[in-house]
Amino acid sequence: MVCFTAILRAMVVLTKQRKFLDLCNVIEYWYQEIQHQNDQNALKKLHELTWKARFCTKYLMRCVILVNFFIALQPIATGYGKFVADVELPGIDFHKSPAYEIMYLLQSCWVVPVSTCSYIPYVSFLLIFIYFGIFAIRHLQQKLADLCLMDEKDALESVKLCVAYHMRIIKFREDLEDFFSLMSLLDASLYCLTLCMMLVYTSMSVNVAEVAYNTNWMDRGKEFRRCILLIIGRSQRPLTLTAGGFKPMNMNTFMAIMRASYSFFSLLQSTM
């Protein structure tokens, strides 16, 4: 999934490279315009958002480097013959030397770094663009709030500038939609699909007890009934996958993720 999305991201950037460069130029021009206006309050907020974006992107890259290093060395640490991602080709035994060493080096030194590092810059650019969009909306809100302190003539001129500023924000949103919408759909679909499959796996394991109970165990012998009872007893504990061995990936965890996401959203909204 990581390799597949990495290839698609690279294709999106290559096919829409002009749109990507235009987005960067828009932000650069907008930034210079705010500096030229010498609005100290806006510049302060813009510098704060710039610092936050840099901090988040650097922190994300460092974490990914550590994870990459762990993923690349994990097969060697756990035993000879294991891969980062299992592969099979007819007529080739990748678990024997020298095919194993070649495939392992290919995965650890090329596939893992390239696929992951192609994802991080993409996410970082999206983060930077969204940060700037948040700043632009807050800047417009401040401009509208200042209208109450102006007389009729100045307020009319300022509100016309606010209309034009609002149109620029809308155009910026449309450019982001055009560039990032396809990959956003892919990310949401793939990762939601993964979580949903985990939930289905858990729910299906619970249904084993119901199916076992509906057999004609009452008409069977003692040993048969004992086996059915054993299956029912073992099925009372769902077969769940866990997140790092800490939390089971079940419906309760899914609801907790939804609640935590909304809480995190509320926190971000109050701090922005």
Image (cartoon, helix red, strand yellow):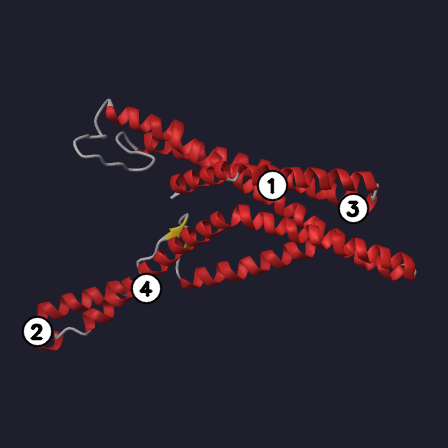
The amino acid at mark 2 is: Arg
Q: Disc 3 designates what residue?
A: 42
Q: CA distance from mark 4 to mark 3?
A: 52 Å
The amino acid at mark 1 is: Cys
Secondary structure beneath label 1: helix
Image coordinates for residue 11, horizontal then vertical, percent: 45, 38
- Of callouts 1 and 2, the N-terminal one: 1
Q: Disc 2 designates what residue?
A: 220
- Of callouts 2 and 4, the N-terminal one: 4
The amino acid at mark 4 is: Ser
- Of callouts 4 and 1, the N-terminal one: 1
Q: Quadrant of residue 72?
A: top left
Residue under the image location 19 percent in, 65 percent down? 230
Q: Disc 1 designates what residue?
A: 56
Q: CA distance from mark 4 to mark 1?
A: 37 Å
Circle 1 residues within 10 Å: few <14, some 14–19, many ≥20: some
Horizontally, residue 30 falls left or right of residue 154, namely left
Asked whether disc 4 touches disc 3, contact meaning CB atoms under 8 Å apart, the reply is no
Q: Is residue 17 visible?
A: yes
Q: CA distance from mark 2 to mark 3?
A: 80 Å
- Indicate whether 12 appears above or below 107: below
Q: Disc 4 designates what residue?
A: 203
Residue under the image location 78 percent in, 55 percent down? 162
Q: Residue furthest left?
A: 221
